[in-house]
Amino acid sequence: MALLRPPALLLALVVSELHCLPWFINVSESQGPGTAIHSFSFNCTAHMPTLELVHVQPPTTFFNRPSLSRWQKIYVGMVTLNSSARLDALAVNHYELQLRFTCGNNVTEGPLYVDVYRDPGYSPCSGRFASPAGEIIQVRETVTPGAQLYTLLLPGLELQHAQISINSAQDPPYFPGPFSINGQGWLLAPSQGLKGQAGKVFQLQILVTFGQNRSCHGMLKVKVLPVPSSQISFLGQARNITILDDLAPGSQVVQVRARGFDVRYEILSPVPCPLFSIGREDGMVRTTAPLELAQAWGAAVTRLQVKAYERLRPWASVDLDLTVNVRSVNRWPPRCLPAMLVTEIPETTLVGTVLNTFTCTDPDSPGSTLNYELRFHSPPGPASLCLRGRALEVNATLDCDTPGACFPHAASILVLDGGQPLMTTEVPVLVMVIPVNEFSPACAPHTFRIREDAGPHTLLGSVVGTDKDYPHNSIEYDISGGPTAFSVDRLSGEIHLLGSLDYELQTLYRLTVLVTDQSQDQDPTHRRSGSCTITIEVEDVNDHAPECQPPFQELTIYAPLGRSVEVTKVSCWVPQEPQRLVFSYSIVGGNSQSRFSLQGPILVHNNMLGPPWPEQPHTHELLIRVADAGPSIPHLSTTATVIVHLVPWSTSTVATRTRRAAVPSMMTPLLVTDTEAFWQPEPWFVVVLTVTSALFLLALGWLFSRLFQGLAQMLQTPRKPAQALLLNSIQGTEESIEGFMEAPRMEMPQTPSSVMSLQLFDGRAQDSRTGRDYLFNTLTGARRWL
C-alpha cells in the first residue's frame, strides 16, 4: 500500500520491499493551534483504513491525533496542532512523530520528522519572558558593578535592528542604582553594585521594538542572593563528554553531581541552550534536539556552564564547565535527485549524449565525496549506457532496426558514501529507446513477361520492397499514375492484370510502383517512400493465321529433262501483324513421286530425277501449308492450292501465259488460257536442227539422185514397168518422208511464225494407247494433248 502525495505538498509514503523512506517537513514556530502541518493521500479499497499517532519524541501534547477522511476513492489523513501548542524553535526545534497506517492486514509504520524553524517575523517575546510572571534571574550581591547579568537580545533580533529598553521606574531607595541594557542586549548590573541588596527582587519592565512599528513587552525579575555561608561543590567527574549524533531528542548525555543540601541544577551558558537541558533535581543532562552534524555543524562541540545550588539557599552555588563533543554517525543513505529516472530517447541519439546528471548528497556529511556505480539489469550484454562521474551518457549506437534490438535498458545507479557503516542508495534507471524512421524503402526494378492472351486478374509477379527500418516488411505498395490495365496489391506487392492486352497495339508497359513504409516511427505520420520502375513486356501470341495472295494458283510449265524449274512463289503475310515475316512452307498434298520441292516460299519442279519420265502432259494439284515460325506459340497455318499443268519439254514449245486469280474456297475456279506462238530455240536445239537439216539435204540429194537414176532406167526400160517402179519408189519415198516428218510434228508443237498458220487445230481425237484426248491439225498433223 502506498501513500500518495497530498494536495498541498503531495509527499508520498512509499514502503517497498527494500527500504522505507521517512518524511521531513519544516514548520514555522509562528504556526498556531489548529494548524494542519501535514496531510497524506493513499488508497485502500477493500478495507476501512486507520491512521494513528503511536508516539512523539520528545514527549509533548502539541500534536492532535491524525484525522482520516475520504475524498473521491482515496483517503486523506491530516496531522494538526492542538489548542495548547506553542512552538518555540529556541526551546525545541525537532520533533519525531511515529505514524502507523493500517489497511486490512497490511500495517505500515513510518516516522514523520517535524523541524521547527525560526520565524523572523514572529514575536520574540514568548515563553517565560512574555508571561505574567516574567523571567526570573538570580545574582549574588557580590556581583561586580556593571557586570553582565542577562542577555535580552534573542537570536535573530540583531538582524531586525531591535531596540531594547527598560520603561519601568527605578527610583531610590528601592533601587541602588538603575539597571541598564547595552547595544548587544545585555542587562548590566547597576554601577553602584548590589552590595547589601540580598533578598530583594527588582522588577524590570522591558520594551522590545523591532521591524516596522512592531514591539512587545516582557518582565524581567532580578533576585539578589546573599553570599553562601556553606560550601557546595561538584563531585569529581570528567569534564569532556563524547556522544554520537544519532541520539534522539531526550536522550541522556551525562549526569552531574554536587555536594550540598537539596541541590538544584541549571545551565548558565549558553542561554538559551538549543541542544541540551539539565534536570533541576537530578542533574541529568539530556538532548533537546537532533544532534545531526549534517544539519547543524555548530553541534559538534558545545561548552556548557552548569550551576549547582541549594534550593533553600540559592546564593550558595558552584559552577561546572562541561564540554560535549558530538561525533558523526553514518545513519542516512545518500539522497539523490532524481530519485528515479525514466526517460525515452530516439534511436538516433548520438554517442556521448548526456541523458541526466544526478545530484546526490549525504545527509550525514554534506559536501562529502560520493561514489557512483552503474549496474545493468537488462540487457546483460554490451552496455549502451555509461556513467561518467555523475552524468549518465549514451555509450553505443542505439539500433531498433534488427529484431529484438529495440529493448528498454534497465539499470540502476548505486551511490555509496564514505561513512561507517557504509550507506548506499540505489537509483532505478529505465531508458526506453524509441524507433525512428531513418531509411526510405526501396524496390529493385524488374521486368515481367505476360502473354497477350492472359485473362484479367492474372498474376504477373510481386514487387519486393526492402526497408532497413524495423519491422522490415511493413511496406505499402501503390502505382503512381501509369496505365490502368495493371494493379498492385497494397500489402503483398503482387501485380495483377486488370484488363486485356493486345501485342499488336502495345508491346511494352512501364509502371512506377511507390513503396511507403508505416509503423516504423513513434510519430505515425512520419513516413518515408521510394519508387522503382516495373517493365511489363507483352509476349506475342499467334492469334492470326497467315493469308496467301492469291490463295489459289493454276499454271502450266514445260519442264526440260535434267533441270529444276521454278514453278511459282507463294506470297503470304499476316495482315494484322505485318511485322511477322518468318513462315515455314511445306507440301502436304499432291506431290506424287516427290517431283516438287520448296525452297522457302518458292515452288520448284525437279526434273533431274530418274525415270519414269512422263511423255504426256500431266496435272498436279499441290497443297502447300504455310505456318508462321518463330517463338510465338501456337503456330497457326493456312493452305494454298497450286495446280500445275506439267508439259514435257520438246524442241519447240508453246509458252502458256496463265492469269492467276484468287478464287474463294466456295467457288469453282475458272482458268482462262491464251496461247502465243514464239520461237526461242536453245543452243543444243540449234545444233541438232543444223545437223538434222544437213542430213535432210543429203537425203534429198540422194533421193533426187535415185529419181534421176530411175528416170534414166525408165527411159531405157519399157514404159509400164518403169512407171510401176517409179510409183513404188515414189510411194516408198513418201512413206519414209512421212515417217521422217511425223516425229517433228509430234515433238514440235510450236514452229516459227512462218508456219504457225498451219498449226491451227481443227480436229480432236483420242489416243488409242493412252486414252488421252488431243487436238490435231489435219493439214500439218500437229497435236496438242488435253
Image (cartoon, rainbow, N blue to C red):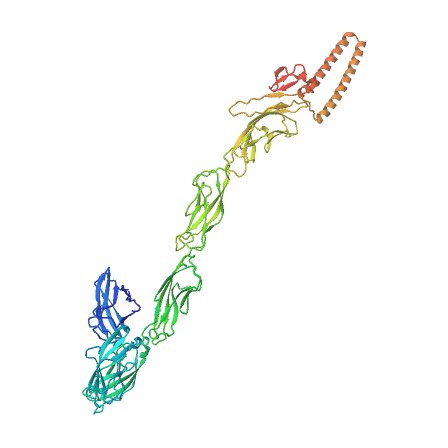
Q: Position of residue 98 (x, y in %)?
A: 24, 71
Q: Position of residue 453 (x, y in %)?
A: 47, 37
Q: Nearer the viewer, residue 593 or 158?
A: 158
Q: Position of residue 623 (x, y in %)?
A: 55, 29
| Image quadrant where one finds the N terminus | bottom left
Quadrant in which residue 630 is drawn: top right
Indicate whether 731 appears above or below 684. Answer: above
Residue at horizontal 58 percent and vertical 28 percent from the top: 592
Quadrant in which residue 743 is drawn: top right
Residue 249 visible (yes or no):
no
From this viewpoint, which residue is outermost toward the front? 171
Q: Nearer the viewer, residue 652 or 343?
A: 343
Q: Nearer the viewer, residue 275 or 634?
A: 275
Q: Is residue 194 left or right of residue 367?
A: left
Q: Is residue 413 left or right of residue 440?
A: left
Q: Position of residue 419 (x, y in %)?
A: 35, 76
Q: Is residue 479 left or right of residue 551?
A: left
Q: How many marks?
A: 0
| Image quadrant where one finds the C terminus | top right
Residue 40 visible (yes or no):
yes
Q: Nearer the viewer, residue 149 or 50?
A: 149
